[in-house]
Amino acid sequence: METYTFLRAFADSWHLLFMFCFFIGVFLFILRPGSRKVHDETANMIFRNDDKPAGDDSAPRMGRHADPKEAR
């Protein structure tokens, strides 16, 4: 049997079954009991170090030492 024919037959049968089982396993792993805390913590990780709400970004920014009267 040629290598290509063997690999093609393997991919069409056993590898397809393996990938399907892997997908189902990942899906069940995500929905396992007790994982909600981990998912909530991961989802809110980027907000962990926020001390105050973000400012209004529509206003033009000035340098730290710029005089607001000069910007007019």
Image (cartoon, rainbow, N blue to C red):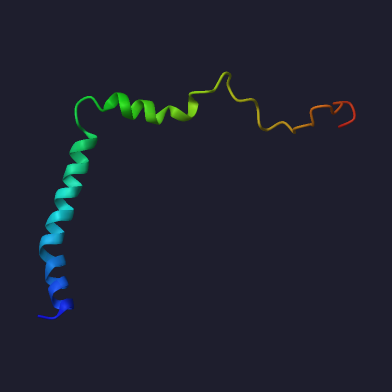
Q: Residue at x 89, y 26 (%)?
A: 69
Indicate left or right for 27 with 41 as reference. left
Q: How many marks?
A: 0
Write down the quadrant of residue 58 in the picture. Answer: top right
Q: Which residue is the extreme one toward the bottom?
A: 2
Relative to residue 65, is residue 22 depicted above or below? below
Residue 62 drawn at (x, y percent)? 78, 31
In which image quadrant can residue 36 be found?
Answer: top left
**Image spot of residue 48 (x, y percent):** 48, 23
**Above/below status of 68 relative to 3:** above
Q: Nearer the viewer, residue 54 or 13?
A: 13
* 44 horizontally vs 65: left or right: left
Q: Position of residue 45 (x, y in %)?
A: 44, 28
What residue appears at the point 57 percent right and 18 percent down from the top-left corner?
A: 51
Residue farthest to the top, as pictured: 51
At x 20%, y 48%, the residue is 23
- Considering the image in quadrants, where does the C terminus appear? top right
Q: Is residue 54 left or right of residue 8?
A: right
Q: Residue furthest right?
A: 70
Choose between 7 and 47: the one closer to the eye: 7
Q: Residue 7 lies in what quarter of the image?
A: bottom left
Quadrant in the picture for the N terminus: bottom left
Which residue occupies 48% across, 30% down? 46
